Image (tube, grey):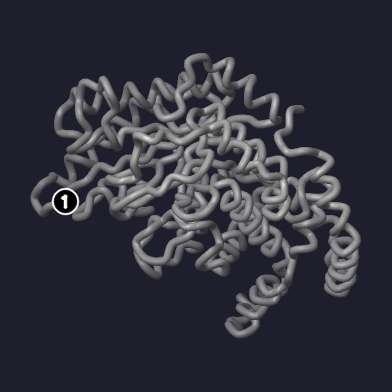
Amino acid sequence: MKQLIDQNLLQEHNTKQEAAVTSDYNALAEKLDRSGIKIDTILEQAKQFTVAVPSWGVGTGGTRFARFPGLGEPRNIFEKLDDCSVIQLLSQATPAVSLHIPWDRPKDPNELRQYAEQYGLHFDAMNSNTFQDQIGQEESYKFGSLTHTDKAVREQAIAHNIDVVELGQKLGSKALTVWVGDGSNFPGQQHFKNSFTHYLESIKEVYKSLPDDWNMLLEHKIFEPAFYSTVIQDWGSNYLAAKETGERCMSLVDLGHHAPNVNIEMIVSRLAQFGKLGGFHFNDSKYGDDDLDSGSINPYQLFLIFNELTDIRAQDPAYSPFYMLDQSHNVTDPVESLMYSAAEVQRAFVKSLLVDRKALTQYQEANDPMMAQASLKQAYNLDVEPILQMARLQAGGAIDPVSCYRASGYRAAVAKSRPADPNKTGSGIV
């Protein structure tokens, strides 16, 4: 398998830290054993955990005011896969890549699939794009796509989504994620019922094109780019649309797309209870943003979400939602942010495995709020870093991915082979 980081460097980097990691791991094993938890069982589950990386995430993001490009940014989907392969090699938690079409459309799908396979990568859910106009596009999405008042625009958006499904089949994907920015910026601009009706009619046409082994994931977003109303604005509208569309149409929860103080972990429980929780886009949020690194603002919330997911899987071991990082890296090296975020999501997952569910249930049934929340905090406050480090070490990754990445000089090397275009600026909406 092809690797872009020198294996000798990786081995040397791990060798310097292996003794300390083993010591910390053994100490944690002893501590967990006193609670009846076998650390090796947790380790194996940690090694099996994966989260997809977004192809667009390996480039520098931006805001409406400016974008400040980084050195050695990938210029095409093949260079994006190069970066994704480095993330997987060092983190050993990101073997899948989620593509955005038409941004990542390959001329030859088979060539792209083979290119990914040489790195041990495969393709996760496909993402369609009807929230911006493309060169040569006949109809404009300025006033909507799947919900537009003009049938011709809706048909164009439907055709694009079907095309994405057909491309995804060639790449080995098994799901289509649909997000639309359709909505309105002024009161009275849009008929609420009619726009939702158009959405349901459109999404059902796309659903008909799905292969039997595919799922459709509907994503909601409370606002932006529509600042007065958004057609699929919350989990309620998302659930209704998924329920109306079909059995394999599910709701996707993006952790940043919620009103302030919304109880996301309860949304997770509700959607799962009625069989419509299909996946997650992991990130974090402070204000109206939704693209900060996962776990950077509210790691406890991330843990509480995984607490619900672990409870769901305890009842249904076959439950397997789609997990993906969905972030915008404006001031950091995207490779570093994605490796760090993957570890933070994995950390929340591992901590959720340490919750004493029998005790928690007893406290809940006895209406003992103090001990119920204390049982969650006991798992959350535990330092599980030795488990994550050991999982990476045994899987062939880096004990400290970011440190190893920096020592490799990868960014400086690709900066030489991927020169920036001097005629492009970072200004404008991106």
The residue wearing badge 1 is: 185
Disc 1 secondary structure class: loop
Q: Is residue 39 above or below residue 336?
A: below
Which quarter of the figure has residue 163? top left
Give the percent coordinates (x, y) of residue 66: 33, 50
Does residue 337 appear to the left or right of 130 in the view shown? right
CA neighbours of label 1 inside 10 A, class few (<14), some (14 to 19), many (20+): some
Q: Is residue 226 above or below residue 362?
A: above
Does residue 27 appear to the left or right of 198 in the view shown? right
Can residue 395 be seen? no
Give the percent coordinates (x, y) of residue 336: 60, 51
Q: What kind of residue is marked 1?
A: Asn
Which residue is at 63% across, 38% downward? 413
Which is nearer the eye, 414 or 180?
414
Q: Is residue 163 above or below residue 41?
A: above
Which residue is at 57% across, 35% downward? 416
Does residue 268 appear to the left or right of 347 in the view shown? left
